Every structure is written in C-alpha cells, then in structure tokens.
Image (cartoon, grey):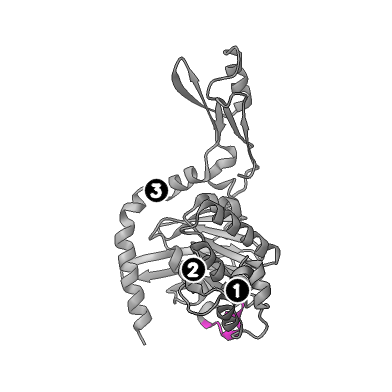
Amino acid sequence: MRGSTVTTVDGGDCVLVSSTPVPVVADNRPRPGDPLDPDAAISVRGLVKRYGDRTAVDGLDLDIRRGEIFALLGPNGAGKTTTVEVLEGYRTRDGGEVRVLGVDPARGGRRWKADLGIVLQSGAGDSQLSVREVLQARASYYAEPRDPDEVLELVGLTEKAGARGRTLSGGQRRRLDVALGIVGRPRLLFLDEPTTGFDPEARRQFWALIRSLRDLGTTMLLTTHYLDEAEALADRVGVLARGQLAEVAVPTALGGRGTAPAVVSWTEDGVRRTAETTTPTAYVRELAARFPGEVPGLTVARPTLEDVYLKMIGQDLEGASASERGAERAASRSEETSP
C-alpha cells in the first residue's frame, strides 16, 4: 500500500504497521454548472438516467484526465454500470452533458468507437478459434491495429497463441479479453471487474499489465469491488452511492484517510487494548516506557480504503440493491428491444 510500511519485530510477536499521513487533497470534482472540460478524456455534467420511476444516476459531474487510471467504486445498484454504458455509447441518457474523447457518445460514429477499448466481465473464452485467430479477426476491424503477435506478448499469451480459447485458464481468458480490448490501439479503455475470479498471483500479474498500458498512454476507467485493486492501480477513485458521486480523490486521501487519527493497538495484562491518537509516534513512546522490552502485539494503523468506502456508501444500500438491480435489468431489456 502506498505510503505504508510493515515491520516485524524480533521474535515475530510484534508487528508495527505505520501509515504515513499524506497531504490533504480536496474533492476535485467539477462543480455543478462548470463547463465541460475540453482537455479531459471524459467530461460529464449533470448526468441523469432513469428506469421507470427510479433514478439510477442523479446529476453526476465528473472529469477524467487523459492518461490516468480512474476507479469507479460503489455497491451493486449504485449506478456504476449505467454510468459506464452511457459513456460507452451503449445507453441513452435522460439528462446532462457528456463528452468522451471530445465526442457526445449518443452521436459517436465508427471513428470514435475505434478509439475505445471495452473489456467486459465475459469475453471470448469459449471460442473454437485459436488465440491468435481470435485476435487477428478483431484486428481486421481497425484501420491501424496493433500487430496481434505484439499484443500477445504484451498480455503474456505468446506461448498460448495456437491454443483454442476454450482451453485457456480463467486468468488466461481474461488476458485474451484485454488483448481484444487493446488490439485496436484504443485511447480510452473501459475495464469492468477485470480480475473477478482471479487467484492472488494472477491478479498481481494482471495489475502489472494494466500499469504497462498506462505507460503506453492509455486512459482507463476501471470498475471493481476489490478495494486493494483500486488502491494499487488507480490515480484517483470516485465513490458512487445512490446514483451520486460521494467523493473523488486519490486513494490515500479518500474520506480523510490521510489526516484521520491513527489506531494504536497492543496487548496488556492479557487484554487487547486500542486507542486513537493524532500523534502515534509520541503515543508509542509512552507505551514503550511502560514495558521492559517490546510492546506486546503492537500495531499502528490508519483507516483503510475499505473502512472509508463502507462508511461513505452506507450499509443500508446492500439491502436495497437486489430489487434495484431487478428494476434496472427490466428497464434495460425494454430499452434495448425498443425501435
């Protein structure tokens, strides 16, 4: 975790986890009424989307800078999927202004669509074609695609180039999904829950791939339920709750993490004790003076990204999400089948 260190004291019975305070970063969303940002990869003002009598997205304002990885967080039913689908041009909006790579998605043509890469939760894993054949077929749709073999090397599938898609492991299928998303040289890549079902090693390898894409200049919008993933990858995160952005900030500053009191925990007289303090170093010195050796079970930590996220979204959202998702799916089917 950025700005954090883990130190194991001799004997292994005392671990100090210190999180260095970071500068306060104010919520840097655009204000309602601000003009669209012509330099942003994505610029949104007052986005509204309704499904029947339910408002899924309620006046969202957001700018995503070119070249950054932005993570959109929120519980099921908060409006993440709807927001992303509007940005991709797959869903109409009921209000607000949206520009993606300078174009209104509702009127985006073939050239604009060629600048987008989309990695959905399900992809081409069951194909009877070989990995190279699938990628070559996708590349043929673009005027200036990346070389398929170059893409296979980038995503770590060179050795699987001749294998059929259905024989790939879960992690390899996800890499193929990404390969299909980037073979057209997208300027903007949408990643929907990219590491769902990955084992820890595969997730770390995938993170390295995403960072390499950022180094190539690709802007990315990531949706994920893994808070450690958002912290590891995102330059900034936005939290959606009830169809509105609760806050936008760098992960280390979200919800006031950077200046929140530290929680000091230790064991004394067989009892686990904790205390909050804004001066953890001084507090630990006082504790150390009370013990002849190491302070038993000492830990010092600040709120995690998960701590502040759960506080921001409110636990009651999870209880309502199932019925909301059902209403959204029904409205989506109606919209997609209408002339």
Residue 53 picture location, percent across and down: 31, 68
Q: CA distance from mark 3 to mark 2?
A: 22 Å
- Mark 1 or mark 2: whose residue is earlier in sequence: 2
* Residue most extreme to the right: 216
Residue 122 picture location, percent across and down: 45, 69
Of residue 10 and residue 215, the one placed in the foreground of this image is 10
Q: Residues within 10 Å of mark 2 (few under 14, many from 20)?
A: some
Q: CA distance from mark 3 to mark 1?
A: 46 Å
Horizontal arrangement in the rendering, residue 286 relative to residue 338 (left or right): right
* Magenta stretch, overall SS: helix
Q: CA distance from mark 1 to mark 2?
A: 31 Å
* Callout 1 amino acid: Ala
- Helix, strand or loop at mark 2: helix
Of residue 56 and residue 174, the one placed in the foreground of this image is 174
Which residue is tagged 1? 161
Which residue is tagged 2? 84
* Callout 3 amino acid: Gly
Q: Residue at x 57, y 83 (%)?
A: 137
Which range of residues does the magenta coloring cover? 107-116
Residue 301 picture location, percent across and down: 55, 34
- Helix, strand or loop at mark 3: loop
Q: Quadrant of the C terminus?
A: bottom left
Q: Quadrant of the N terminus?
A: top right
* Callout 2 amino acid: Val
Q: Which of the labelled discs sits on residue 314, or is there none?
A: 3
Specify whether residue 96 is in view. Answer: no
In this view, 194 is above or below 89:
above
Horizontal arrangement in the rendering, residue 277 relative to residue 148 (left or right): left
Q: Residue at x 66, y 75 (%)?
A: 149
- Mark 3 or mark 1: whose residue is earlier in sequence: 1
Residue 18 picture location, percent across and down: 61, 33
